């Protein structure tokens, strides 16, 4: 397979005596947040310098440098002997064209390695240790093996609350940090794990219509069928320059954009690339990840949503209370006002799972459509109400009614329309959304009541159907907890663009539909603190 773009011509070899003896080559490989360099095995510099595969190297060009993991290749179609290749993201950091002079050298080992070894041995680390480790991570000085060692060590030997604070502080200190020059700057975040939970796309226009500053930078899906940024992308552009986002926020008091362009807490982005494949999401790492991003984004006040349910990330009230206390401790130390809300995580929120389906649900709520999912509406109103109570002019307990008035009056819809237009909005008809062209229904196998919906399995089926990459794919829920059902009645409908995706989803749903049917007394107890 040719890893290069076909339109890249052969690069000329360097002149004898050139201070930069190689030519830079863009290698069209997405290495997901890891800088990778490529050298040909027969390259004279490779042999002379004693490079080894997977070692850390430093590539210099155009007055810039990139630290990268070295891959050694034998195929000249990837890189030739006089070239050094860089993966897509690493090449973009150089800001040059193909063929620019470059040089490569062994990278200095990270200075924080002794601290990493102490953490692996189970020792408690100090503030300076975490600062050194996070700085080296943000500068890509750690190899994937060293990153994995750090993630596993901080997961197995659970960080104490002071260590979590030190890690959060260190992560917020590297990268960009925004100062909006006003207070309060509000935000809302959910710890995740609940499909269809698109409350941010309702909370932002409600709070912004009230006049509070709510610059919402959201993530794309990593292991879920849709992130807020994926769903907003159905309606508007989400990858915008920081300067344009600032203009939008100043004019409309809010935005809904992908946070990757802002380079907030970059060490977190690197750590996530290791945590997700390992399915590690320890409490300490979760708190540091979320709060460092919020502080770096300039938030002063945060409403945090912790869903609790049998197939949620947090499965019991004691576990939720413990996590709440950790968030509150670290947020207070970081100077962030936080309101932690424990919510219903027994089932997906809304009816759609997948970007287009979730955008349909959001727009139905904003337009006060009688078909709008009531659970999504009510949860968004309550979260927005808690955010509105950060306004010193709003009395405690009045936020919900104010939020409901903003939504019912159409002011939230008008504000969302303005934000969508400012972000280069697209036409979207929630009455007839352009869903994927193939579909099948999953049917009930018995009469009874819906007593359980497995969040993880429904998310998995939606991803197998193609979400979020295929925006119109996903799962449309036709039954929710407590609903009566008859044998042969449809529980949900799966949409997919490709026959292979449809088959994968069909096989997964046949093995486990994600639904349990029984008696009304078997519906799990509701954990909620509104």
Image (cartoon, rainbow, N blue to C red):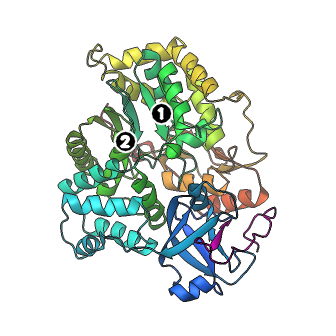
Which residue is label 1 attached to?
200
Boundaries of the magenta span: 1-27
Location of residue 425 in the rendering, given as x and y in whole percent from the top left corner: 66, 28
Location of residue 434 in the rendering, given as x and y in whole percent from the top left corner: 75, 37
The outermost residue toward the front is 17
Which residue is label 2 attached to?
296
* The N terminus, quarter of image: bottom right
Q: Main secondary structure of the magenta part?
A: loop
Q: CA distance from mark 2 to mark 1?
A: 19 Å
Q: Is residue 8 magenta?
A: yes
Location of residue 9 in the rendering, given as x and y in whole percent from the top left corner: 80, 66
State the residue at coordinates (52%, 26%). 247
State the residue at coordinates (49%, 26%). 249
Q: Residues within 10 Å of mark 2 (few under 14, many from 20)?
A: many
Q: Earlier in the sequence, mark 2 or mark 1?
A: 1
> Element type at marker 1?
helix
Q: Is residue 142 magenta?
A: no
Q: Nearer the viewer, residue 131 or 315?
A: 131
Q: Is residue 505 visible?
A: yes
């Amino acid at each position: 397979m040719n890893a290069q773009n076909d339109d890249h011509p052969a690069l000329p070899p360097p002149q004898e005596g050139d201070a930069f003896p190689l030519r830079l080559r863009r290698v069209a490989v997405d290495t997901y947040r890891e800088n990778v360099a490529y050298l040909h095995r027969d390259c004279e510099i490779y042999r002379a310098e004693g490079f080894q595969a997977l070692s850390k190297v430093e590539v210099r060009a155009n007055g810039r440098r990139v630290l990268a993991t070295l891959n050694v290749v034998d195929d000249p179609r990837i890189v030739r002997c006089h070239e050094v290749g860089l993966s897509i993201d690493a090449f973009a950091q150089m800001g040059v064209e193909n063929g620019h002079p470059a040089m490569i050298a062994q990278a200095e080992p990270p200075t924080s390695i002794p601290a990493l070894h102490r953490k692996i041995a189970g020792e408690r680390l100090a503030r300076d240790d975490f600062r050194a480790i996070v700085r080296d991570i943000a500068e890509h000085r750690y190899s994937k093996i060293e990153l994995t060692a750090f993630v596993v060590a901080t997961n197995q030997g659970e960080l104490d609350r002071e260590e979590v604070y030190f890690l959060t502080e260190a992560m917020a200190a590297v990268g960009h940090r925004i100062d909006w020059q006003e207070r309060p700057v509000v935000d809302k975040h959910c710890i995740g794990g609940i499909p269809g939970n698109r409350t941010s796309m309702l909370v932002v226009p409600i709070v912004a219509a009230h006049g509070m500053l709510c610059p919402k930078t959201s993530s794309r899906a990593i292991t879920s069928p849709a992130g807020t940024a994926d769903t907003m992308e159905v309606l508007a552009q989400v990858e915008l320059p920081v300067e344009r986002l600032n203009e939008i926020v100043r004019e409309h008091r809010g935005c809904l954009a992908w946070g990757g362009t802002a380079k907030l807490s970059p060490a977190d982005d690197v750590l996530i690339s290791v945590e997700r494949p390992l399915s590690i999401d320890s409490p300490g790492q979760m708190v540091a990840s979320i709060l460092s991003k919020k502080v770096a984004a300039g938030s002063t006040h945060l409403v945090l949503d912790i869903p609790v349910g049998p197939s949620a990330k947090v499965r019991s009230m004691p576990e939720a209370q413990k996590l709440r206390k950790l968030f509150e401790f670290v947020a207070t130390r970081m100077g962030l006002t936080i309101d932690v809300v424990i919510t219903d995580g027994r089932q997906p929120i809304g009816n759609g799972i997948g970007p287009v389906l979730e955008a349909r649900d959001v727009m139905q709520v904003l337009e006060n459509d009688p078909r709008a999912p009531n659970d999504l509406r009510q949860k968004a109103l309550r979260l927005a109400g808690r955010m509105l109570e950060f306004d010193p002019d709003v009395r405690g307990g009045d936020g919900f009614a104010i939020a409901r008035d903003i939504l019912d009056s159409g002011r939230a819809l008008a504000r969302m329309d303005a934000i969508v237009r400012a972000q280069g909005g697209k036409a979207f008809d929630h009455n007839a959304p352009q869903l994927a062209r193939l579909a099948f229904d999953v049917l009930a196998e018995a009469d009874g009541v819906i007593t359980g919906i497995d969040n993880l399995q429904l998310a998995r089926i939606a991803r197998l159907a193609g979400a979020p990459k295929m925006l119109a794919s996903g799962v449309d829920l036709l039954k929710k907890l407590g609903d009566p059902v008859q044998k042969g009645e449809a529980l949900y409908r799966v949409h997919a663009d490709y026959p292979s995706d449809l088959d994968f989803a069909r096989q997964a749903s046949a093995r486990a539909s994600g639904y349990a049917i029984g008696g009304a007394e078997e519906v799990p107890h509701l954990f909620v603190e509104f």
